[in-house]
Image (tube, rainbow, N blue to C red):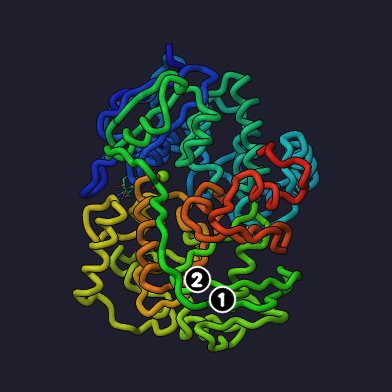
Amino acid sequence: MAFLEFKTISKGYPGVQALSNISFGVEKGAVHGLMGENGAGKSTLIRVLSGDQSADEGSILIDGVEQKYSSVRDAFHAGVIVIHQELQLVPELTVAENLWLGRFPGRAGVINGKTLIETVRAKLDEIGIDVDPFAKVSSLPIGARQMVEIAKAVMLDARVIALDEPTSSLSSRESEILFSLIGKLKAKGTVIIYVSHRLDEIFRLCDSLTVLRDGKLAAHHPDIGKTTREQIIAEMVGREIANIWGWRERPLGDVRLEVKTLSGSKLRNPISFSVRKGEILGFFGLIGAGRSEMARLLYGADHRHQGNVAIDGVAVSPNNPKASINAGMVLCPEDRKFDGIIQGRSIEENIAISSRRHFSPFGVLNSKKEASIADQFIAKLRVRTPSRKQDIINLSGGNQQKVILGRWLSEQGVKVLVIDEPTRGIDVGAKSEIYEILYELAAGGMAIVVISSELPEVMGISDRIMVMCQGRVAADVERADFDERSILTAALPDKNVAGTI
Ligand SMILES: Nc1ncnc2c1ncn2[C@@H]1O[C@H](COP(=O)(O)OP(=O)(O)OP(=O)(O)O)[C@@H](O)[C@H]1O
Ligand SMILES: [Mg+2]
């Protein structure tokens, strides 16, 4: 008998039936994957499981007992812990305080400093997570914050743990720690629900799998070994996608972006490269390799020590994002959730407020053209929403990402587009649409710099790849010479362990 059972769960929001009649069970000690396009209902199901949202209909059974909980606290006492897609840590508290809070949800009480720190340090060591318990959460990089969330779940003895896209901001090393933690939990008999858009992870970790589509159960696979990637993709998007990348040869023009000996405090070794009109240059490296730092220096968001950047032969003034924008360069940052979303505003407004208009906040919005651009992106990227007037905050995580991407991709007069982790959190169907847009923009003469930590993606869409490792360029590879193993080897700080990840 299934240890965890969802029975005929339905949940609606105004204008959206997020879940319709979902039933499936998960065995004790199993890792159960949950997949589906952005907006398919994965996080909603997890929220119902966590007591954060109540279902309109249906019930949840754990070990044969129907759960009546109506709050996160109830669910927590029933042994259910959820790590949400959006991090729940309190940024102003330290790591230790955050971990401690998890033990008493909803009660911040007085904390005995010494016991707390000792307990937390011992626990973090045991789990294998390397963060300072005294560090304020707000000072940690996203990956480290995510690890703290995970440590929090592991420290509490849960019967059911649900992880909603846990690896989207983890480095490969951190992901490995997470996977080994999942192995330990599984051995203890914990049920794990694992939400991810990454098929590799799903196949590696999961015993069984459920696919949701438009809030309905599209497929349930009690044994994941009996299915294939292609089948799952088809179940998710309702159509076959033969080639996600769709790369094709493009004519390249003159040099559009020229970067010479660029360096800064986080990128000490000067870096030089150029990108031609129509070219897509990929930057690959493991998290921490210096790619995002390079992008910020290039754009002028960080102070450069030296170097020159020119667009079409004209020098761009340094250290000034506004000058970069005026020269035709835009940067779509990695942390779009943090940098990009304007809460309380509609999808349409979130697309229309272009990165240029950030600098003239009184620009007039809502023209017909903007409405039509918004509708185009909603259709093209399959944003699941009742209308373009919907408040962006009501969209699923991946659909928010699509909207913010739409803002950068619809920008007019751009010559150089720098885009960091373009498809993080985005489902496989919309990914291929985003690549298609990038190809179209390139074909129109744009020079595109794509930064990604997903090797198949960089290899799939780039014309050329610069591999970064520990703040310097470790390799510069033409498409004809793309080779997974040599690119990975170049990206690894310890060159002896190639092939182990
Ligand atoms: N508070 C809300 N108000 C209105 N609609 C909502 C609300 N929360 C979620 N929805 C809608 O419910 C649907 C399911 O969203 P959910 O977050 O469960 O998707 P998901 O499968 O987790 O997607 P993603 O892969 O993007 O994270 C979406 O269409 C979303 O817009
Ligand atoms: Mg989600």
Name which residue lies at 22% across and 69% down. 371
Mark 2 and ligand 1: say if the CB distance to the nearest ligand atom is below 8 Å: no
Q: Of residues 78 and 131, which is closer to you in this image?
A: 131
**Quarter holding the N terminus?**
top left
Name which residue lies at 35% across and 46% down. 429
Is residue 110 visible in the rendered image? The answer is no
Q: Amino acid at mark 2?
A: Leu
Instruction: Work out whether mark 2 precedes mark 1 in sequence or the reverse, and give the earlier one.
Output: 1
Q: Secondary structure at mark 2?
A: strand
Question: Do the residues bearing badges 2 and 1 touch, measured as CB atoms within 8 Å?
Answer: yes
Query: Distance between the Cα atoms at labels 2 and 1?
Result: 7 Å
Expressed as whole percent of the image width and height from the top left, the position of residue 375 reads 23, 62
Instruction: Give the residue pinned by disc 1.
Output: 299
The part of the image, by quadrant, that contains residue 211 is top left
The part of the image, by quadrant, that contains residue 452 is bottom right
Expressed as whole percent of the image width and height from the top left, the position of residue 2 reads 43, 15
24 relative to 238, above or below: above
Expressed as whole percent of the image width and height from the top left, the position of residue 467 reads 64, 58
Name which residue lies at 35% across and 50% down. 430
Q: Kindly identify which numbered label has been placed on residue 331.
A: 2
